[in-house]
Amino acid sequence: MLRLPLFEFRAPRTIAESARILNGEGGNAMVVAGGTDLLPNMKRRQQAPGMLVSLRNVPGLRDIQFGEAGCRLGACLTLTEIAQEPRFRGGSSSLWQAAAQVATPPIRNMATLGGNICLDTRCNYYNQSYEWRKAIDFCIKKDGTRCWVAPSSRKCVAVSSTDTAPALIALGARVRLVSHSGEREVLLSDLYNNDGIDYLTRRPDEIVTEVLVDALQGWRSTYWKLRRRGSFDFPVLSVAAAVKTVKDGIVEGAQIVIGSAASRPLMAMQAANFLMGRTLSNEVIDETAGLAFRIAKPLDNTDFDMTWRKRVTGEFVKYALRELRGDDMRAERISLTRQAFHPSV
Amino acid sequence: MPIAPEESKKTAQIKLVLNGEEMDVAFAPYKTLLEVLREDLWHTGTKHGCELGECGACAVLVNGKPVLSCLLLALECGGTNVTTVEGLGVNGELHPLQDAFADLGAAQCGYCTPGILVTMKALLDSSANPTRDMIREALSGNLCRCTGYLQIFEAVESAVLNIAEAKKQASAA
Amino acid sequence: MTTPEKKDKAEDLRVIGTARRRVDARAKVTGQTRFADDIALPRMAFCKLLRSPHAHARIRNINFSRALAHPGVYLVLTGKDLRIRYGVLPVSQDEQALCLDHVRHVGDPVAAVVAREELTALNALDLIDVDYEILPTISNPEEALATPTPRIHEYGDEGNIHKRVSLQFGDVEASFAESDEVFEDTFFYQGNTHLPIEQHAAVATRDPDGKLTIWSSTQTPHYLHRALARVLRMPAGHIRVIATPNGGGFGGKSDPFHHEIVISRAALILDRPVKIGLTREEVFYCHRGRHPVLMKFRTGVKKDGTITGMHLQTLIDGGAYGSYGVASTLYTGALQTTTYHIPRYKFQGCRTFTNKPPCGPKRGHGTVQPRFGQEVQIDKIAEKLNMDPAEFRLKNAVKPNSLTANFLELGTVGLPECIRQVVKVSGWNEKFRKLPEGRGVGLACSCYLTGAGLPINANAMPHSGVQLKLDRGGGVTLYCGTSEIGQGSDDVLAAIVAEVLGIDTFDIRVYTGDTDLGPVDLGSYSSRVTIMAGNAALQAAERVKSLLAEAVGIKLSVPTEQLRFADHYVYDVGATARRMSFRDAICLAESKFGTLGTVGSYTPPKSAALFPGGGVGPSPTYSYSAAVVEVEVSPETGWLTVSKVWIAHDIGRALNPPLARGQVEGSVYMGLGEALMEEMEYRRLPKKFSHALVHKFPSILEYKSPTSLDMPEIETVLVENPDPRGPFGAKEVGQGPLLPIIPAVANAVYDAVGVRVDESPVTPEKIVKALAEKKAGRAPRYGPKHFPAVNWGFTLFVPPPWEGGDGYALSDIRSAAHRAG
């Protein structure tokens, strides 16, 4: 049986106390919420915090508030709670669709929104046991010096594998970060670096406490996830798209985010800008997909062949935009994800 | 012989309700709920196939919800209500799910069965008449290598009917 | 599930053929089945193994003094403590419980630590210093052929070739010359693994009297028993092996394993129980799964679709050890002749060693790979001849009770009925080549052994034995060496005895898998338990029944042949009121004969295949299957979805229909996994930086096993035509239904989008590549392009039965041809 290494354990009752512990411990402590990412990593000795700071007893982190201006989501809401929230099932459904497709039902009962946003980047050479990594003399992300995906790279290219972040970035979400020295709010898209090791702009002493999404009148959003099986698997490519259209279907606002094709979710700015002022005709969708396709640079460090993953990027952008146009995409969804995940509109 | 630094010193202690019974258990603080159930509480009905959250064999109910006991620190389970396969039957009578699984070939090797049974119990507790698609979805975190799942779906559907029938008879009586 | 023809009701079977709760079901649904890892004994210590991080290396030195000094550590073992080699086959005694001086794959065990806690043992592994001398690695058979040295093993047919076979049954080239067309196709079948959800585990203890007992999740307690006696130099009689119910086996727990031997040694030294539970990654390193096989088929046909001859070559990636590999090699060529009549047949097989975990037997052992190639090639042939593939197969189907070119004796043959059934229920005639672009159907057939006809260790003793004990309270206790791996073997034995004695399966206590208690059964492999242990149980039950009948007949004044055993009574079929309870019958018989107990045993019939290599393939009888798979394929992405599977299986008789259906569906499931996503992938790192050769991702997350959401509906038809060789007519069902699934998927993809993927698994990437070939006007195909040159050595010539053959090779002095000069 795989066993966790030894660690000290703290279960503070307030955010302030949690922040104070993190501050005192320097890099030695890590926050644990759902544990579904951290504990496997600890069992494989990829991460070895000397102390775990549990957020389970901190009140308020599982609150969900909807108001005029938008909604505030506690970082410790489970993905099941997000996926079951009826207010995410309308036209802007990307968050629901993303949360509902993470891993498996029991994992979604444990895993939290904050945890999924901060999910460690993944790589075929990294998410392995200590013994396996020893057999390759380790890698740049942990204990080694070389990136085995791109041996000439001086940077780690581990893949951003969060489902919810692309979906939330497409909605323009922000996150609140709290530390001993204060708190700040950043755009979720600014939380990420395109670096497999230093993938978050969050400091180790900061805690993600909330996700904030502004009210999005007139916006529709959707999330498409590529993986081998109907459950369990991390995304090896995802597309989140959001559009706001005015009458006659003219696009007034658009976001396209590509997940799992780099060490951070990628904003397909050019593709999104191209949509502005146009209608979602087949020609426009094809052109947009071509622009988004260009920025995806999947590498050989996940399941599936990388050239094929890149090819699918374009198709997924088309699927997403066709769905936002109002096409019935249930057959494609069922074929790809084994479930409909159809917005109830 | 001296004690290794990593050795269990049973320094942690929690109270929890296990299958309706209040339990007090001491354990090594690095252990997950899976290890404490199997090694410290001698409830070996809960199985494990990877200890990384990749198979679902270790599923148990915590406060009624299916979770993976291999990814849950036992330290965090104080005060919770845990249900394992050992807690499904009542007074020596099998739960209708257990009867259906036994009769309809839903358990072949039986190794994934405990995790699947508790997961399906949670489904039936929250939804009296689930569709095949709902069963399929709820089961999608539990790998089975023997059955191909179809006889499991059928057993759950059969249990649903039996539970409904029993309720009808109880209310008629 | 449908059953096409109702069985003869005159048989009046009460237990056999009825849907029943299996005897071990209650234990399984209550979590009370005691798997190996559930066993905990007082004073139990824990073992962890240090494994090689190198794919190929010499061990220069091991220093474990720091580990031994670590607090909580009881014992460290190395190869010096377990020097004797072992292996499941007598011809491949090439494993060491801990490598002495040579490691052959990443994960090869090098040292063992036994400690008070598992975590302590794990941490102490890091305190063992091993000095390795790195050796060049071999990653596939082509490299093995090109790299005779350094040798991975010091034995084998040549260089890094483990086993070479070349057999010819009639002059195939002459047949080809007379054919209207000879088709030549190469295929590659990727390796994959069993992935039982239960990881291997075992507990060993020194009994109070000094003997050894080991509980282990093993399919083959008898072979473990032999290996332990050999390596530990102990009389087998002083070793007790108890096979705990396996949490899935599928062939992966059929070898004696290093961890079992290591903890046995440790328990003997420490005089306390020692447990080991492998991690999932370690299970991948035990492997023994499906061999990757490159195949070349040449098949001659007449214009009317008659097959004239076949020449098959297989190049097999064996991994680092022998395991069952010699048998696997022969199996890649053994059963090509058992589905369609092939008048002349040539088979050449070559298994090489590579620096990867050893391959071995997985469900359908060695026959799945060539069945894929053969059934896809038939689809191509039928298309070229403008014949319906179902018609082509029906036309060439073998005849019951016939001999094949390679001297396999067929029993009942349900193949034509399976084809007709599956064509009917799938709506084949309305779908094949008629569905819209992107949707398609494919058909394939197969055949499998009902038990290996020859024992692994040559001897004339029975392959299976059953002992029955009857007690005065009416209870029956059954003892047998079989291993219950989830397939329902305990229930099979109980059902047969219950049927004969007219009682319920619940009245029978079944003790299996314990070498101290039960007579030998060779193990749960080759689909042998139902026919072999089942026939042994039948014989034991009939023997005790005759004792009871004799006693009751005298008492009731009824001729014994007029007595019937049913519903817990022995009664006169002419006057059913004249009866005696089963319990009273036991007391009566015990008064007359003394303590009641009988034994039964089973030895398969002698094989007609007398040539070298003829030991693999013979079986008392064979099962048949036919499947139709319907798929949807996206022409843009190649995304492949199996929408439905129809399968008909010739089972002889279903002893417990829900269990039989479960075996069919489980086989279809595993077949779909192999067809669509499962593969054992390895990778080298860039050679200028690293010598590493590792499994790409040894985890249950990245080894893709279909989930409940990935599983299509299956319609199962059990074709029941009882075979007199099986107990109550039963044949196998646990493996055969896997085989047609993989080629049926590939054939359906062709029907859907017009491209051939001649390689497993059939993935979207490969479909897209084949579609690109098609678009470019080249052969619409993805698959291997060539078969390397292999020095096959001397070819044994065996004339087929219809050319005067007597089963011996021509060169054999025992052959009629030889005697005739």
Image: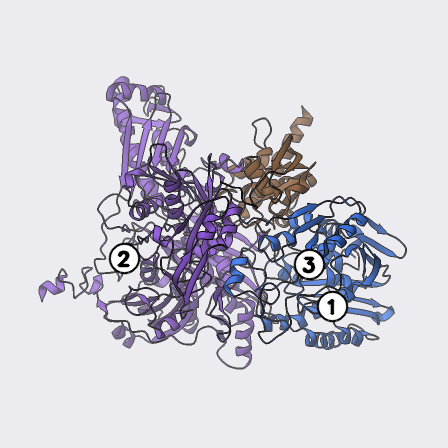
Chain colours: A blue, B brown, C purple
Using the image, determine if residue C778 lies above or below residue B135. Answer: below
Residue contact at pointers 2 and 3, CB within 8 angstroms: no
Q: CA distance from mark 1 to mark 3?
A: 17 Å
Which label was assigned to residue A257?
1
Q: Mark 2 Cα within 10 Å, few/some/many (few <14, many 20+)?
A: some
Left/right of residue B40 with respect to residue A210 in the rendered view: left
Q: Nearer the viewer, residue A108 or B91?
A: A108
Q: Mark 3 Cα within 10 Å, few/some/many (few <14, many 20+)?
A: some
Q: Quadrant of residue A306?
A: bottom right
The residue singled out by tag 3 in the image is A119
Q: Position of residue C37 (x, y in %)?
A: 48, 42
Q: Give the amino acid at mark 3.
A: Leu
Q: Position of residue C329 (x, y in %)?
A: 33, 62
What's the chain of the residue with tag 2? Answer: C
Q: Mark 1 Cα within 10 Å, few/some/many (few <14, many 20+)?
A: many
Q: Give the amino acid at mark 1.
A: Val
Q: Are both tags, 1 and 2, on one chain?
A: no
Q: Quadrant of residue A149?
A: bottom right
Which of discs 1 and 2 lies nearer the camera? The answer is 2
SS assignment at label 2? loop
Left/right of residue C18 with respect to residue C437 in the rendered view: left
Which label was assigned to residue C91?
2
Using the image, determine if residue C607 lies above or below residue C496. Answer: below
SS assignment at label 3? loop
Using the image, determine if residue C458 lies above or below residue C27. Answer: below
Q: Nearer the viewer, residue C155 or C22?
A: C155
